[in-house]
Image (tube, rainbow, N blue to C red):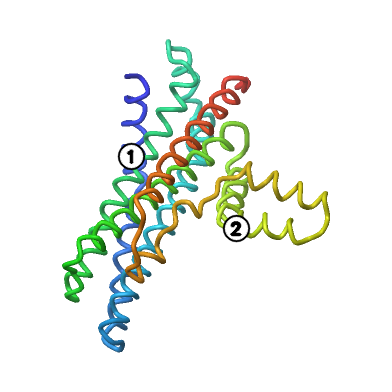
Amino acid sequence: MVAWAIAKNTFKEAVRSKILYSLIFFALVMMGVSLVLDQVTVGQRSKIIIDFGLASINLFGILIAIVVGIGLVYKEIEKRTIYPLLAKPVRRSEFLIGKYFGIVLTLGVEVVLMSFFLFLLMAIYGLSTDSRMFDLGLLAAIFLIFLEMAVIAAVAILFSSFSTPFLSGMFTLAVYVIGHLTEDLKRLGALSGSPALEKMTAFFYYLLPNLENFNIKGEVVYQLPVEAGRILLGLLYGLLYIGLLIFFSSMLFQRRDFR
């Protein structure tokens, strides 16, 4: 209950900080895309709207996850509001978990609203489809994008539990970029012919999240079948990774000296 109260308060703070105003920019970007759609064929129009829409939801969500995640703990320390809170019978792990779920709630609202803009644009251009599998694939792609945001938010929380906002932001951004290149990184090590490099790339491959597990945008854009196992893998992988990140974040935060 304590963690949930902190989560609700974190969500309210995010709304007050006008973070949801990024939705206005997202809507303007989508409107800008719609202006050039009259110049393309109907078939290409569908691909452009869905591809750009999913990419925009992903980009805006990841930026929010990083920006909000890296500053939550630091703001509490800077404003000295964390001291009376932790003086109460509130465990540090509850505080951190509450903050994390507050971010996830904010991201969830963002994803729902941005998805609404995407579906609205599809409806305006008459791109609704009778294919049930396509509709489910699009919803699955949005769900996995949300899971990826939740993982990145957990990464941001991990770094913010012991570092400054600037360094936390840089580290989290690096994890996001490398997380989409882990397969290439492992392949590079295998082709290098250097045992040391191969071991190093293998280490980072297993340490960092493989964010491609959440990427089915290509299949959805080209209306290819998406296996249920792929979605289940993304869900289980995401939940496991988030659990580990929050566990280690709580351990680090527990040992942090606020004096």
Dividing the picture into quadrants, the one containing residue 38 is bottom left
Mark 2 neighbour class, 10 Å CA radius: few under 14, some 14 to 19, many 20 or more:
some
- The numbered mark, 2 or 1, whose residue comes first in the sequence reads 1
Q: CA distance from mark 2 to mark 1?
A: 28 Å
Secondary element under disc 2, as helix, strand or loop, is: loop
Secondary element under disc 1, as helix, strand or loop, is: helix
The quarter in which the C terminus is drawn is top right
Q: Tell whether 249 sits left or right of 124.
A: right
Q: Tell whether 199 sits left or right of 208.
A: right
x and y, in percent, of residue 17 in the image:
37, 45
Dot 1 corresponds to which residue? 105
x and y, in percent, of residue 57 in the image:
37, 59
Question: Mark 1 belongs to which amino acid?
Answer: Leu
Question: Mark 2 belongs to which amino acid?
Answer: Leu
| On screen, residue 31 above or below 138 | below
| On screen, residue 14 above or below 56 | above
Q: Residue at x 32, y 43 (%)?
A: 15
x and y, in percent, of residue 113 in the image:
26, 54
Front tag of 2 and 1: 2
x and y, in percent, of residue 215 in the image:
44, 57
Dot 2 corresponds to which residue? 181
Furthest-top residue in view? 89
Q: Tell whether 257 sits left or right of 16.
A: right
Residue 152's disc is: none
